Image (cartoon, rainbow, N blue to C red):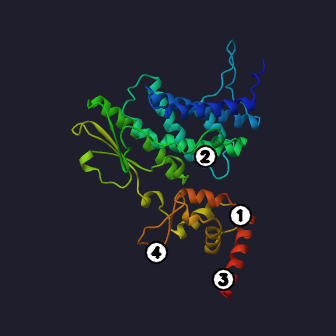
Amino acid sequence: MSAPYVSIRRLADNSLSAMLSAVEVYNKPQMTYRDEVTVMLVVNAWELALKATLRQKNQSIFYPKKRGERYRSIGIDDALARVGSNGLWPVGVSGAAVTANIKALAEYRDRAIHLYNAQGLGAVIYPFLQQNVLNYRDFMLAKFKKDLADSMTWQLLPLGATAPADVVQFMKVDRNSKMIAEVEDFINELRVLMDAVEKSEGDIGRVATVYDINLQSVKKMSSADLVVAVSSTADGQVVVRKTDPNQTHPYSATELLNRVNAKRSGRKLTSYDLQAICWKELLREEAKYAWKHSNGATHVWSGEAISYLVSLTDERYAAVRSEYGAHRRENSKN
């Protein structure tokens, strides 16, 4: 008996529906079990999208059939592994980083499904959830020409009875030691995933909207990274602080070029190539790529800038160099 027929189009469409449902659930003004339901839908959306990607390349999405049993389709972990091993991640999308992001959410989902007390982890998981939606949009657009933005607005306003925190977000949790231990254990799982991406030089910007995690006492919180602090003496608060640009944009122009050249298959890029593409595409004005302190002389660059520059072809760089050269010659006449 052959494996069941699976429609690629239906997989992709159902995946998109699951992600849209996740966004709708998360943005409801009154919703219990919000984080848990949202994450379950998000992970399901990715599982379907990854299976559709495998089917595009005629790859099986089933485990070997056992005698007397029905075919079983693969789970999220195996889907991620198969997409990675077959080199099916789109250009410009760091497979290692997106995998770490999805696994972070899957870890949260598993804790919720298996009756762990997930209360208190919402502030921890939010940065991963936000980045996941952006990753998903890029992935679906590259693989299936489906743009999530066509089905939703990106101008959602965080309206509420109290103003949202700007730099530090607070969330109450139970002050018992069991809850604190569970939060700490979950954070440690996230650290393992993020450390693996950093060691593989994946695009850490694809993992979360913040970049490092430390478990500290509220009173000792001073790291510029993302800090998740759990304290049994400070009203049981979990505190999430956003990272600063020194952590998110760690590369000088020289380091940026070295990392880009190490990953590209084309010719070696020069500082002139960087100047030209920055002029043409205004990269220095894109916060996700570049940052410069108000008193600083030069820009520093993010992991996302590396991925973007790697994705451009030699032909694109040559065309931009030509335009940039003509622009400079014209300016020199004036």
Residues at discs 1 and 2 in contact (Cβ within 8 Å): no
Q: Residue at x 26, y 32 (%)?
A: 175
Earlier sequence position, callout 3 versus callout 1: 1
Please tell me whether mark 2 sits on a helix, a strand or a loop: helix
Earlier sequence position, callout 1 versus callout 2: 2
Earlier sequence position, callout 3 versus callout 4: 4
The mark closer to the camera, 3 or 2, is 3
Q: Which residue is mark 4?
A: 297
Q: Residue at x 69, y 46 (%)?
A: 142
Mark 1: which amino acid? Gly
The mark closer to the camera, 4 or 1, is 4
Mark 4: which amino acid? Ala
Q: Quadrant of the N terminus?
A: top right
Earlier sequence position, callout 4 versus callout 1: 1
Distance between mark 3 and mark 4 Cα atoms:
23 Å
Earlier sequence position, callout 2 versus callout 4: 2
Please tell me how crowded label 2 is: few (under 14), some (14-19), or many (20+) other residues with Cα within 10 Å: many
Distance between mark 4 and mark 1 Cα atoms:
31 Å
108 sits to left or right of 46: left
Q: Which mark is residue 331?
A: 3
Q: Quadrant of residue 63?
A: top right
Q: Nearer the viewer, residue 27 or 193?
A: 27
Residue 87 shows in the view = no
Earlier sequence position, callout 3 versus callout 2: 2
Q: Quadrant of residue 117?
A: top left
- Residue 87 to residue 294: above or below: above
Distance between mark 3 and mark 2 Cα atoms:
42 Å
Please tell me how crowded label 1 is: few (under 14), some (14-19), or many (20+) other residues with Cα within 10 Å: few
